[in-house]
Image: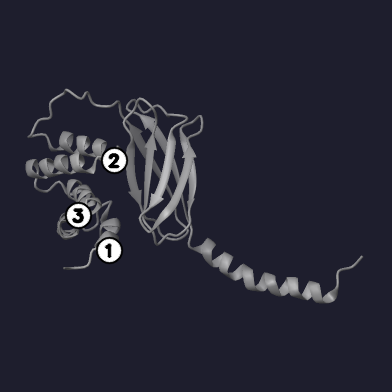
Amino acid sequence: MRGHPSKIWIAAWAALVVLPPVAALAAREARVTGLVVGESGSPIPGAAITITTPNVASYRLELTTDRRGRFSAVLIDADWSYAIRAEKQGLAPSLTQVQLPPGANQSLSLTLHPPAAASSPVSANDPEELFRRGMESYNTGDVRMAGSYFVRATQAKRDLAKAYFWLAMCEFKMDRKAESRATFQRYLQLAPDGDQAAAAREMLAKVPPQ
């Protein structure tokens, strides 16, 4: 039995209305493929991947690396910045941020390290170690402790740009907005084309001048 002509016309009209927005959304997408490895460079299967964005608080994409330690995800809006976190039991988590142009396909690698011994001292003169400890604390959600490490890292090395970016993120999360704005600006002074430059500018837009 053939469909009623009016129903066919309505279905065709609906397709014309719906398809352009879907195509427009697809044009805004980007794709990221990742590899999670250990300190030796060996792939880590079964690592948990969590992708979030500050643009939409409810957005949360959860994945698991395959037997080759790989994962792939479509980022639905290339205007947004995304935080990609990798973790596996017994290892310290790793976190990175990305922002890609529409239609891009970027590959990245995240390394999971054994957790640092709690009793091991941290040299006040070793900015990279202080930064590493800061990232460990940040990735476990202890932004106050992370911020203290990043402050010490910047004191040990005044031009350690990445420490300023993550210090600014800690300040933002602790609702110290004026301080976070100044710290983001300091990061951009040191690294205007750095890995987190786009994310820093986006964060600055959320912290208007007082």
Identify which residue is drawn at 25% across, 51% down. Answer: 173
The crowd level at tag 1 (other Cα within 10 Å; few <14, some 14-19, many 20+) is few
The residue shown at (74%, 70%) is 11
Depth check, mark 3 against mark 2: the one in front is 2
Q: Callout 3, which amino acid?
A: Ala
Query: Residue 10: image x %, image y %?
Result: 75, 74
Instruction: Classify mark 2: helix, strand or loop.
Output: loop
| Near-viewer residue (20 or 182) | 182
Residue receiving disc 3: 191
Q: Quadrant of the N terminus?
A: bottom right
Image coordinates of residue 57 in percent, x first then y, are 39, 55
Q: Residue at x 33, y 37 (%)?
A: 94
How far is mark 1 from mark 3, CA to CA? 20 Å
Real-space Cα distance between discs 2 and 1? 21 Å
- The location of residue 195, given as percent across then percent down, is 28, 51
Name the quadrant containing residue 56: bottom left
Of helix, strand and loop, which one carries label 1? helix
Q: Which residue is mark 1?
A: 206
In the depicted structure, whether residue 22 falls above or below residue 65: below
Q: Is residue 193 above or below residue 137?
A: below
Q: Where is 25 relative to 58, above or below?
A: below
Residue that mark 2 sits on? 141
Q: On the rendered structure, is 102 left or right of 110?
A: right
Q: Quadrant of residue 208?
A: bottom left
Q: Dot 2: within a 10 Å radius of its alpha carbon, few (fewer than 14), some, or many (20 or more) residues?
A: few
